[in-house]
């Protein structure tokens, strides 16, 4: 995980990076893998009753959320809002009030639904704070790592300028040089 991501978004970034596009590795490949991933993130209890149906739901939600991140580059991609809303609905979020009257979103369920609700609550708060749009997907098609954009104007395109950015710019330069008559 990137050192730049705010602590409250760390779990979201980690969840969205649970698939590695470059190698094809997926921590959510099967129920046991997702349970290991949850245990590694101090959420073992959330995976205790995990089913194949839960796993398919979580993988689909992760894919849709990663698609949303493509829009964070300013692209005109269309997000299937009704489908994403339907995927989020089973998680169950409730509003809890503290002794001071402050309201917070909290998971209403248990198990994997509690985990997903926690991720979604963080996204809601980050949306309100403006930090959700700083979570982006690397523009390199062979990478697509989720990273937190710390640039002042929020224009960063790659997870690493040194690696993915350099590769992209070198490729573009080579194409320009070889396409000349």
Image: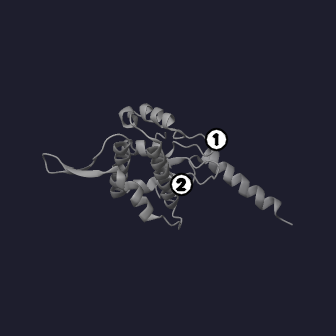
Mark 1 residue element: loop
- Local packing at callout 1 (Cα closer than 10 Å; few below 14, some 14-19, many 20+) is few
Specify which label sits upstream in the sequence, 2 or 1.
Answer: 1
- Tag on residue 156? 2
Let me know if residue 13 appears in the view.
no
- Where residue 84 sits: x, y (%)? 43, 59
Question: Mark 1 sits on what residue?
Answer: 23
- From the viewer's perspective, tell me whether residue 93 is left or right of residue 80: left
- From the viewer's perspective, tell me whether residue 12 is left or right of residue 162: left
Q: Residue at x 72, y 52 (%)?
A: 170
Q: Check the image and report above or below for 35 versus 175.
A: above
- Tag on residue 74? none
The count of marks equals: 2
Q: Check the image and report above or below for 39 versus 90.
A: above
Let me know if residue 163 appears in the view.
yes
- From the viewer's perspective, tell me whether residue 113 is left or right of residue 78: left
């Amino acid at each position: 995980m990137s050192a730049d991501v705010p602590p409250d978004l760390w779990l979201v970034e980690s969840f969205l990076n649970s698939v590695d596009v470059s190698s094809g590795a997926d921590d959510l490949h099967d129920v046991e893998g997702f349970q290991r991933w949850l245990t590694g993130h101090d959420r073992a209890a959330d995976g205790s009753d995990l089913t194949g149906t839960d796993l398919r739901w979580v993988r689909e939600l992760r894919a849709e959320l990663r698609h949303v991140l493509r829009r964070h580059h300013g692209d005109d991609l269309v997000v299937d809002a009704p489908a994403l809303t339907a995927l989020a609905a089973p998680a169950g979020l409730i509003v809890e009030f503290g002794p001071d009257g402050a309201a917070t979103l909290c998971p209403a369920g248990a198990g994997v639904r509690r985990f997903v609700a926690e991720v979604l609550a963080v996204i809601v708060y980050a949306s309100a704070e403006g930090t959700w749009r700083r979570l982006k997907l690397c523009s390199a098609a062979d990478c697509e790592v989720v990273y937190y954009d710390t640039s002042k104007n929020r224009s960063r395109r790659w997870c690493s300028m040194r690696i993915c950015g350099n590769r992209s710019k070198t490729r573009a330069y080579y194409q320009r040089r070889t396409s000349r008559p």
